[in-house]
Amino acid sequence: METFRSLSYGDKWRLRGFVFRGEAPDDPRLAPAAVELAEGYQHQDRRFRGLGRWFPAVMGVAFVLLALVGAVKGETVSTVLYALIALGHLAQYAFNPATRPKQVARALSASRRGAEAH
């Protein structure tokens, strides 16, 4: 992950977006880092991969339920707090490349082809 770590934060976010969408980066200098990132997602331990994939979704649903309970009880502060936490978990689920293993595999193969071409 040395190549990935040496990138700027902007390049890291762009690269995560490419891996999330299952695409190779447009910039050929980012292809080796994309390969490293996608391989990192694929080589995680099977149990951790499943936990990392589904935990944000389960927690998001749990906090939505807590927000609904708070709303029924009339607790405004806890309802808003739980809704914000649920929103954060669901956003993590929606935008985390680890939740889309097929896209990661597509990005890995496309990035490998791009890295070999240059």
Image: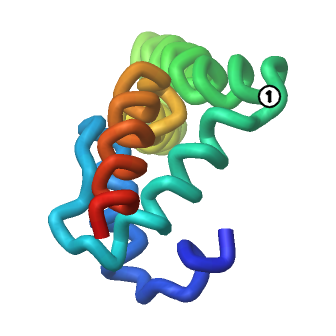
Q: Position of residue 45 (x, y in %)?
A: 83, 29
Q: Nearer the viewer, residue 8 or 93?
A: 8
- Callout 1 amino acid: Phe
Q: How many marks?
A: 1
Image quarter hosting the N terminus: bottom right
Q: Which residue is mark 1?
A: 48
Coordinates of residue 99 in the picture (x, y in percent):
48, 27
Q: How is the image coloured?
A: rainbow
Report if residue 27 is visible in the image.
yes
The quadrant where residue 96 appears: top left
Residue 38 horizontal/vertical position (percent):
52, 46
Q: Is residue 16 above or below residue 80?
A: below
Q: Is residue 97 above or below residue 99?
A: below
Query: As drawn, is 83 to the left or to the right of 53?
Result: left
Nearest to the observer: residue 27 or residue 102: 27
> Is 15 situated above or below 98?
below
Residue 105 image offset from top left, x and y in percent: 44, 29
Residue occupying the far front of the picture: 117
Residue drawn at point x = 43 percent, y = 34 percent = 104
In which quadrant of the rendered view does residue 21 lie?
Answer: top left
Q: Secondary structure at mark 1?
A: helix
Q: Residue at x 80, y 28 (%)?
A: 48
Q: Which residue is found at the position 71% from the left and 26% from the top?
A: 49
Quarter occupied by the C terminus? bottom left
| Towards the viewer: 60 or 34 | 34
Can residue 73 be spotted in the picture?
no
**For the residue carrying disc 1, how many other residues have a C-alpha within 10 Å: few (<14), some (14-19), or many (20+)?**
few
